[in-house]
Image (cartoon, rainbow, N blue to C red):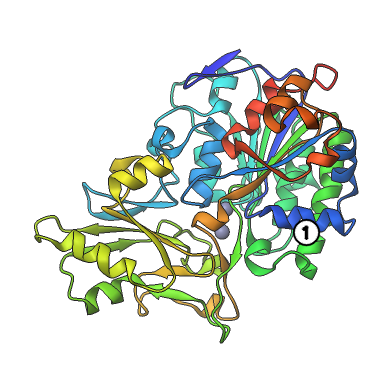
Amino acid sequence: MIDLCGRRYALPARKTVVFCVDGCAPEYLDQALADGLMPRLAGSLAGGGLYVRGRGQIPSFTNPNNVSIATGQPARVHGISGNYYLDAASGHEVPMNDPRFLRVPTLFEKMEQAGVRTLCITAKDKLRALLGACREGGPRPISLSAEKAHEQAIPEHGIASITAAVGRESPSIYDWDISHYAMEMGLALHERVSATLLYVSLTDYVQHKEPPRGPMSDRFHARFDALYGAYLDAGFVCGITADHGMNDKTAPDGSPNVRYLEDALREAGVPGFRVLLPITDPYVVHHGALGSYATVYVDAAQGGALERAAAVLARIPGVELVLPREDAARRFALPDDRIGDLVVLGDRSTVLGKSAAYHDLSAVQRGLRSHGGLHEAEVPILVSHPLRPDEQARLLGASTTAAGGGARGRESALSNADVFDLVLNRLSTAAA
Ligand code: ZN
Ligand code: ZN
């Protein structure tokens, strides 16, 4: 057993992997299962595997949610409040990709301390350092990315070339199968490094570009299923979740359905404000830095400015919620020192920008799908093997202890931060 922030985890009894399918709203899996594109996943569910809906973390962005999966904790505890935040000391907007922003160790670091070899593979290189963090010294989790696979090696295990081990060149970060490459890396490498606990985090390029049943989306899920099957065949227990979902954010004329918060505040004459978009990351083709969550800093010296800003923002059509810092921190379990004075959420079809002049929309001109708000915070939670009957009953109610089918996709109180707990602690002993 290891202890991480008061949660206890059993050491893996057999090879275990969790896949974070980036941007995977449950509808993607529901549709692909219904269309027969995921026979291996369907087989797991028919055999008693778990599939429920659960909560992701707000903001429904990649970094906070991946770190919640990796720590079992909300951002209030782990500290990663967005992909970006405003460093109050320097006044600079900085990406939260560096392990120095973590306030707790990851499960992988703790497992390494307990002698469990862990392997983290992320499609997006921006997550690599966070997943490989080693705050307390001791052995370091192996952390690789598909995006930079051509530059990486594991010399201590005699692996001079990741791409040679996988057997094909790594695709570009904007290719439909870069996520599958990350999964292939895990299959090719885990035995060579003696890893028994894997975390494979994908990227949401496909989900940003296509809804369920799009041709690329269909190919994505069929290939995911084949690789999922390869993990099962290699003897893995698999957990699957998402960091967040995805929704269409396109106006009737096909342009991004965006509200520019700085422009609105300026026009209303609010003094001394700054809008931060914590979705910002290097992958502008995905979303053009437009998501449904923004945080606004207001100069406290300007009397009444905070209240005026909140009122102006709340009146913008498509703005769903404007919360003062303390309320947002409490409601969404966020670290109050790493969010602005106001948190602003766009509705299901609306994204929030800084100003019309700031954003380069050339990459998202033909329709925008994005995330960040409440409507992208529902995620699928799946386990390949049956849970203990008492756990199944606790999660789903006593009536659904039998093989998953009837409970497939129903709502639960779980969050994506619970997935490692499910696969390490809650499996039926026959599965473990
Ligand atoms: Zn994501
Ligand atoms: Zn995204």
Is the residue at mark 1 in contact range of ligand 2, meaning its CB lies under 8 Å from it? Answer: no
User: Residue 323: x and y, percent?
Assistant: 33, 54
Q: Is residue 131 above or below residue 203?
A: above
The reply to whether residue 159 is visible in this rendering is no
Nearest to the observer: residue 326 or residue 43:
326
Label 1 Cα crowd, 10 Å radius (few <14 / some 14-19 / many 20+)? many
Residue at 90% of width from left, 38% of height from top? 46
Q: Residue furthest bottom?
A: 253
Residue at 53% of width from left, 69% of height from top? 349
Residue at 76% of width from left, 69% of height from top? 214
Nearest to the observer: residue 327 or residue 123:
327
Quadrant of the drawing holding the N terminus: top right
User: Residue 118: x and y, percent?
Assistant: 65, 27
Residue 246 occupies quadrant: bottom right
User: Residue 126: x and y, percent?
Assistant: 52, 49
Nearest to the observer: residue 20 or residue 269:
269
Total of numbered circles in the picture? 1
The reply to whether residue 409 is visible in this rendering is yes
Q: Residue furthest front?
A: 399
Q: Is residue 123 left or right of residue 14?
A: left
Q: Is residue 156 above or below residue 405?
A: above
Residue 326 occupies quadrant: top left
Q: Amino acid at mark 1?
A: Phe
Q: Is residue 385 left or right of residue 348?
A: right
User: Residue 185: x and y, percent?
Assistant: 74, 43
Residue at 58% of width from left, 29% of height from top? 141
Query: Element under label 1?
Result: helix
Q: Is residue 313 above or below residue 202?
A: below
Q: Is residue 180 above or below residue 413?
A: below
Query: According to the image, label 1 marks what residue?
Result: 220
Quadrant of the drawing holding the C terminus: top right
